[in-house]
Image (cartoon, rainbow, N blue to C red):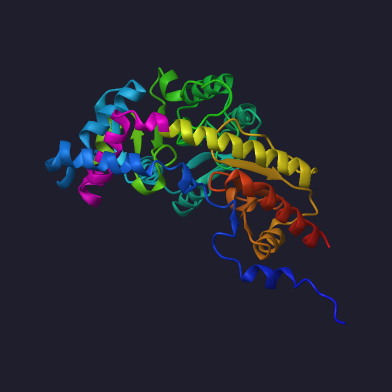
Amino acid sequence: MPTARTPPASVRFEAMTAEQLISFARGAPSLDIVDVEGLKAAAVRAFDADPAGVTAYGTSVGYLPLRTWIADKHGVEADQVLITNGSLQADAFLFDHLVRPGDAVVVERPTYDRTLLNLQRMGSELHGISIQPDGLDTAELRKLLESGARPRLAHIIPNYQNPAGVTLSLEKRRELLDLAAEYDFTIFEDDPYADIRFRGEALPSMLSMDTRNVVVHASSFTKTVCPGVRVGYLVGPADLIADIAKKATSLYISPGMVSQAIVHQFCVSGDIDRSIETVCRALGERARVLAESLRRHIPEARFVEPDGGYFLWVELPEDVDVDKLAPAAAERGVAVVKGSDFVVDGGRHALRLAYSAVTADRIDEGVRRIAEAMAAVRG
């Protein structure tokens, strides 16, 4: 009598539905923590309150009531705010305005992969500075500056960094501001995760600490409202914002007034505060479960458990090559992002795991499958 035989993983998981796949790849919230009903109500209020403003072209600086709300949130004047189609466009506007081919730019190592790609395409001379558990290694940066490097810009993700999940300490924020003033470079504070905090105390933004006009700040409503609204913004010196606004006018006349008006109503109603509470509560549990699962299934993994945000960075043993691990995990129904995507060179033994889109009840199974894939590639 023939015995039952388990089919190979490549066969077992080809038949999986999208619902059965477990993806740690995308930094986006799962639908269950998006306030769909609140957004629908905000849309109705937006059209009722300001039909002319919502349906018109508007101005290149964005929907003016939302611009005022953002200015109030950050304690700046409205002419220091430019609203964009997502924060990545805010990044692109600033890079295009400040950086020329051959200019030195400091980036964290690792850093957001799309920022890295955009700066590489611009022909920047990139200087990757190591990240520690309390953020950028400012001693390493000082050493670079003392050696003669003169960056035009330092791109910093201070809170719950993408991909490393770490937070820049208050002491290092002060030191970075001092270095920027001393060596005459701009700090680009890319800060879309600040409100997604589930442990510890909130730290002041470098924008709020800046007394020497060295910081340009960017953020987004992607993580606090939902990715689909595509609303981000820049905060900086009024003259810089005015110059970028002129370029925006030539590019698209104005960003999307409908989505910005909906976000404005979502914010002024207080729905955003409730949304943030929901997201923080859910992601705090998911981050905790992910850390516990890694300790259980992959005890040799090294990581810093994040206090907020969407991501956890995992350093694996040197005999685990993520170029082999990623496809092996995919065969087992798990999507991950290779650490090598987030650095100019290296990262061959690291993964970024985004826990934002994976419900807590599926995380342990996802990590178990990654451990199984690790065993397979190690031979």
Which sits in the foreground, 77 or 2?
2
Q: Residue furthest right?
A: 1
Q: Main secondary structure of the magenta part?
A: helix
Left or right: 169 as drawn, with respect to 242 = right
Residue 18: give x, y in percent of width and height: 54, 62
Say which residue appears at 44% left-offset and 18% top-offset.
209
Verify whether residue 266 appears in magenta: yes
Say which residue appears at 84% left-offset and 63% top-offset.
379
Residue 38: give x, y in percent of width and height: 34, 39
Q: Quadrant of residue 34?
A: top left
Q: Quadrant of the N terminus?
A: bottom right
Which sits in the foreground, 2 or 42?
2
Q: Is residue 298 visible?
A: no
Residue 187: give x, y in percent of width and height: 46, 31
Residue 308: give x, y in percent of width and height: 56, 32
Q: Quadrant of residue 236?
A: top left
Left or right: 308 as drawn, with respect to 223 = right
Q: Quadrant of residue 2?
A: bottom right
Magenta span of residues: 246-274
Say which residue appears at 69% left-offset and 70% top-offset.
12
Say which residue appears at 51% left-offset and 33% top-offset.
280
Verify whether residue 296 appears in magenta: no
Q: Is residue 49 visible?
A: yes
Q: Residue furthest left?
A: 52
Which sits in the foreground, 20 or 302?
20
